[in-house]
Amino acid sequence: MITLINSDYAKIGYEFVFYGGAEECERCELNKACLEGLDKGRRYRVIALREIEHPCRINEKVRVVEVEETEILGVIESRKAFAGSSIIFDSVECGNIFCKNSKYCMPEGLVNGEKYEIRETLDKLECERGKSYTLVRFKRVG
């Protein structure tokens, strides 16, 4: 996918979550090149850079880059954690934002109710609620 991002962040490997365009973007002639094809709430990674830069009302300069949707780390119940299997994601909602694992319980870029493939199982994590969870690498299906 081709898009435009702030030139300061245009580096291979840079990841971002797309939250949609700003109000100023609606009047910009580069609107489609910048926003079309990106889905709100998804996490993307820059995989290639192009030499072309454009002026931008918000970011000063934007650069043409190629991006792909990334794999995302998150947790699921250990009994469901099998590499290669597909699941409908349902985030862990414990409410403890100070837990060291909370960023994996409700990770940015994973959407409840959507289908994901478990690409890799990583560490087992113990939860204060007494349940056993496994850290996995997810990739959206479809």
Image (cartoon, rainbow, N blue to C red):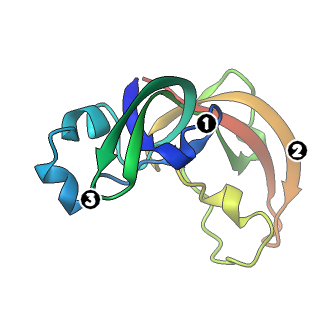
- In front: label 3 or label 2: 3
CB within 8 Å, label 3 to label 2: no
Q: Secondary structure at mark 1?
A: loop
Say if residue 87 shows up in the picture. Answer: no
Residue at figure coordinates x 21%, y 35% from the top left: 32
Q: Of marks 1 and 3, which one's residue comes earlier in the chain? A: 1
How far apart, in angstroms, are the residues tagged by discs 2 and 1?
Answer: 29 Å
- In front: label 1 or label 3: 1
Q: Which residue is mark 1?
A: 11
Q: Identify which amino acid the numbered label 3 is placed on.
A: Ala
- In front: label 2 or label 1: 1
Residue 136 is left or right of residue 62, and the answer is: right
Q: Of marks 2 and 1, which one's residue comes earlier in the chain? A: 1
Residue 130 is left or right of residue 51, and the answer is: right
The quadrant of the image that shows the N terminus is top left
Residue 37 is left or right of residue 66, and the answer is: left
How far apart, in angstroms, are the residues tagged by discs 3 and 2?
Answer: 38 Å
Q: Which residue is mark 2?
A: 123
Task: Residue 15 in the image: state x and y as whole percent.
Answer: 59, 43
* Residue 76 in the image: above or below residue 101: above
Q: Identify which amino acid the numbered label 1 is placed on.
A: Lys
Give the number of the disc on residue 71.
Answer: none
Q: Secondary structure at mark 3?
A: loop
Q: Identify which amino acid the numbered label 2 is placed on.
A: Asp
Query: In the depicted view, which residue is nearer to us: 138 or 80?
Result: 138
Q: How many marks?
A: 3
Give the number of the disc on residue 22.
Answer: 3
